Amino acid sequence: GVRLVGSEMCIRDSLDAIFVDFGSERNGFLPLREVSREYYLSEPIPGEKRDIKKLLEEGQEIVVQVTKEERGSKGAALTTFISLAGRFIVLMPNKAKAGGISRKIMGQDREQILDNLNNLGVPKEAGLIIRTAGVGRSDIELEWDLKHLLSIWNSIKKIAVNTCLLYTSDA
């Protein structure tokens, strides 16, 4: 399932990663490549190696999603690129240009879904995937699912303070 938490972090520049206190026994591991630019304090200089200590600061609060549970002596693997699964859509609210159509959707269904996708009001900072359950659904049904997921994301962003479980899903 999906678990989203508001978190504090401890930067380890030698690893180019962050250890995140997200309320579990062990801190989670968040590599810099899994940190959305929305959390950067300054833009990295093109062509230069990104300095994690210039981009982020210790104690900064972020919203993370567990991508791999704790195992053995290792903490959970984390990302800030959130995925929220709805009935017909998977919303990636902070990953622009991501997504598309489920690989399982083929032929005419794929063409129809492409039309549906163009009719949805997807925010420019977000991406989405139309799930197989979205085949044959009307624009209205898909738009409802998108609006529902966006309202969940907006609620998460509003209450993302301190270390606490904000949202969980078995989807």
Image (cartoon, helix red, strand yellow):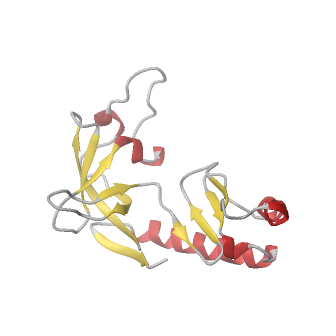
Relative to 124, 139 lies left or right: right
Residue at the farthest top position: 47
Quarter of the figure that contains the N terminus: bottom left
Q: Nearer the viewer, residue 123 or 98?
A: 98
Name the residue: 75% across, 73% down.
135
Relative to 147, 165 lies left or right: left
User: Picture coordinates of residue 128 (x, y %)?
Assistant: 63, 60
Name the residue: 55% across, 52% down.
95
Relative to 22, 87 lies left or right: right
User: Picture coordinates of residue 125 (x, y %)?
Assistant: 61, 52
Residue 44 falls in image quadrant:
top left
Q: Nearer the viewer, residue 58 or 18?
A: 18
Total numbered circles: 0
The correct choice, above or below, for 167 with respect to 157 in the image is below
User: Picture coordinates of residue 16 (x, y %)?
Assistant: 28, 37
Q: Nearer the viewer, residue 161 or 87?
A: 87
The correct choice, above or below, for 166 with respect to 12 in the image is below
User: Picture coordinates of residue 146 (x, y %)?
Assistant: 66, 71
Q: Nearer the viewer, residue 168 or 9?
A: 168
The correct choice, above or below, for 145 with respect to 7 in the image is below
Name the residue: 36% across, 37% down.
55
Relative to 39, 120 lies left or right: right
The correct choice, above or below, for 134 with respect to 35 in the image is below
Residue 156 falls in image quadrant:
bottom left
